[in-house]
Amino acid sequence: MKKTLLRAAFAAMIIALLSSCVSTSKADKVEGEAVSKSAAKEAKTAKSKSVKEPKVSKKKFDEKAYAAAYEKGDYTACASMLLGRNVKKDVIKDMLDADMLMYNSEMYKSSGKGFLETYGLMQQSSAQLNAGEALKASLSVETNTNYGGAEYERYLAWSMRLACALNLDQEDVANGIMKDYIGTFMDEIQALRELNDQVEKGSEIALESDEFKSAQQKLSSSGINFSFVERPKKSSVRYETSPFFNYLGTLSYAANGDFDHAQQFADVYKVPKASELVSVPADKGRLEIVALTGLIGQREDVSAGRDPEKFVLHLNDIKRDVPIYTKITYPIFNPASQTSKITAVRISLSDGQYAPAVLIEDFDKAVAIDVAQKAYGAYSRSVFRNVVKNAIVVGSVIGAAVAVQQAAKLNALAAVAADIGLNTAIQIAAGAVAKIEKADTRQGIYFPNKASAAGFVVEPGTYSVKVEYLSGSSVVETKTIENIVVKPGKVTARVSSCQK
């Protein structure tokens, strides 16, 4: 009750602060109203800016061709193949990766449109899936559910929409994105959290079900008593909000000349150095450069590289031993899975100013929080699947053994046929459960590892910017942004990226 009141008070405070720019759309109208309005606005604005980009059309996915294209830095070709892969349960994941690849190719118009469409699919995924269906699917096979995007990925998708708009000087589009955020996004995130909580609670309850207890009893009566280990601790820590999104949101208001809302938004979300973004001298301009670096750390299966635990089912009547395997899986976070070369970013302007970029957010923390939240429930589901499926396997083996005994009393031909049936049952039993038992480690792989930024107060005019991505004191890569027009009393922003 207390948490509900706090959330209500917080939402009321946000709405009061931003009442002049709040969208009244609700979560159940997003797909038909808010998203379509944003899409129309973004398409109209992009057209007026006359941005020319190569068309990204769907192509058949080819693993070797994809690897070769990525190695060459041909991210557009990679995006085309991801969009053409059409693995139904992973569509949103592939689209997220394609959107980010287009962004890294500096195709901001296509990327912005892509992130909008991808988020629309995320909304549909949440609306169409209830906790019972999600739990039922995951109790059968962990990756049986469609991929819908974790909380941090939804924040990142909105952040990248803002980044695209800022790079294209589409201040009105950025402002529209922030209106939709206040009007719909927070409600959707809360609904997603509640869905995840219900699945996690249901995962624990499944271990108290009659189905599970009956399966345990069947195994125990056959002399098999699994001793499961490595149970992860429960975590109550949430990814409450994204510092990167909050920073870009403040920046978007400031870029649109709405310094009052920029300050209010920054105060609510405690955005660092926000005062510098909202206090631009009337005769000067401010140029803000954001740098996205590396690749986000990845989920891994805790059982990866480990042999399944082996038990033996003794069939004394026919003098056979049958191997039964169990493997408990759940996701863990490995920050070293995508080790970035980049340790710092240095930004310099054509007027001679330079500054190191200051860290805004480390996205590995977001993945670690998400994994810690979901590992306990994933463990429970894995235990459930191991026990129930192995009980079915044991039942089929025992049934086949009984058939062998009965057939032996009839004739030799029947005995041979029954023995073949037993051998088949044993082959199915030997490792079948362990082979298909895998944790759900799906996530976008091309999001950045870190976001950093530096800002400059400059004379009105046109500037070029050099962004140096450093490993220690060595320059890993240099990117240049040309022809940035900075106006008096205005904030102009650009968001660069380097995956190395």
Image: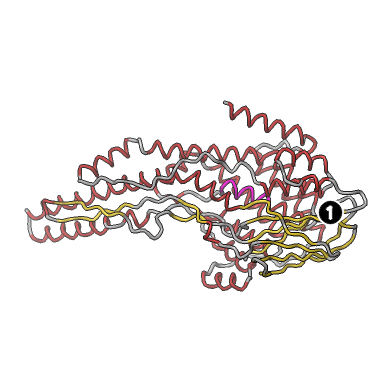
Residue bearing the label numbered 1? 286
> Residue 373, relative to residue 299: is it above or below?
above
Q: In which quarter of the image is the N terminus?
A: top right
Q: In this view, does 264 lie to the left or right of 430?
A: right
The stretch drawn in magenta includes residue 157: yes
Q: Is residue 137 at least partly visible in the picture?
A: no
Q: What stretch is highlighted in magenta?
A: 150-159
Towards the viewer: 7 or 343: 343
Model colouring = secondary structure
> Residue 174, relative to residue 199: is it above or below?
below
The stretch drawn in magenta includes residue 421: no
Mark 1, Cα crowd under 10 Å, few <14 / some 14-19 / many 20+, is many
Return the x and y of residue 141 as percentages of the image width and height: 41, 50
Secondary element at image label 1 = strand
Q: Please report the residue visible at 84 percent of the width from the left and 65 percent of the height from the top.
A: 352
Return the x and y of residue 143 as percentages of the image width and height: 45, 51
Q: In this view, does 24 lie to the left or right of 422?
A: right
